[in-house]
Amino acid sequence: MAVTQFALIPTILFLLILLLSNGEMIGVFWCYPAAGAFHFMLPRRKAWTATLVLFSIVIPLSGSFVDPMLGVRIIATLALVSIAAAVFVRVISEQQRQLRLQAMTDPLTGLLNRMLLNETLDWAIEQSKRLELPMTLVTLDIDHFKRVNDIFGHDVGDEVLRQVSGLLMSRMRRMDKVFRWDYITCNTS
């Protein structure tokens, strides 16, 4: 990220200044992908800052070699490209956030899933060692849960799991983590 901010972005802006200062229309066309790239490569505020710098370069230079009405269309198109890129990045970021959440949580209970358990335990053990603080690991098993499913059906069993999960989540502290370990026994006989 630092290379992008401190090397690539200034290089792009410098090259655009060179193209535009030569009075070539091709320089204007390179401004559009540059504006989009800023939003994909930089955090939101820095992307808009780079875009404003781009506008401050394009407006005076394009006005010197194109018809004023064409210049207005160039600036309007550049603004639309920047806005569209910012919207796309926001939508993609939200989708990534939702996918991460889906990958980390159990869909039935909303608890963290087994995939994160080992990673979280390793981190907690390291924290406990480093800070010399005690830690607690608690496991909970619903006795004879299979009979609930067998007698009342899986829908009722799912509701029991949701209720127990809700109870655990309502009682936990912000620093606590609750996982669902879906342990399935296999009868090998």
Image (cartoon, rainbow, N blue to C red):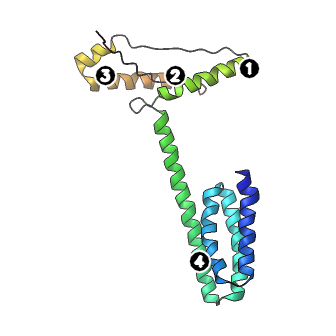
Dot 3 or dot 2: first in sequence order is 3
Give the residue at x 27% y 19%: 149
Assess whether mark 3 and mark 1 are in contact (beta carbons under 8 angstroms): no
- Tell me the SS state at disc 3: helix
Residue 173 appears in view: no
* Residue where numbered disc 4 is placed: 76
Q: Nearer the viewer, residue 155 or 181?
A: 181
Disc 4 marks a residue whose amino acid type is Ala
* Residue where numbered disc 1 is placed: 131
Q: Nearer the viewer, residue 33 or 157?
A: 33
State the image coordinates of residue 61 (x, y, percent, origin top left): 72, 81
Disc 1 marks a residue whose amino acid type is Leu
Distance of label 3 from label 2 (alpha carbons): 21 Å
**How packed is label 4: few (under 14 Cα within 10 Å), some, or many (20 or more)?**
few
Assess whether mark 1 and mark 2 are in contact (beta carbons under 8 angstroms): no
Of circles 2 and 1, which is in front? Answer: 1
* Residue where numbered disc 2 is placed: 171
Quadrant of the drawing holding the C terminus: top left
Number of marks? 4
Assess whether mark 2 and mark 3 are in contact (beta carbons under 8 angstroms): no
**How packed is label 3: few (under 14 Cα within 10 Å), some, or many (20 or more)?**
some
Dot 1 or dot 3: first in sequence order is 1
Q: Is residue 188 left or right of residue 26?
A: left
State the image coordinates of residue 117 (x, y, percent, origin top left): 53, 24
Disc 2 marks a residue whose amino acid type is Arg
Q: Is residue 23 left or right of residue 164?
A: right
Distance of label 3 from label 4 (alpha carbons): 58 Å
Q: Nearer the viewer, residue 170 or 176?
A: 176
Q: Residue furthest front?
A: 189
State the image coordinates of residue 121 (x, y, percent, origin top left): 58, 21
* Residue where numbered disc 3 is placed: 157
Dot 2 or dot 4: first in sequence order is 4
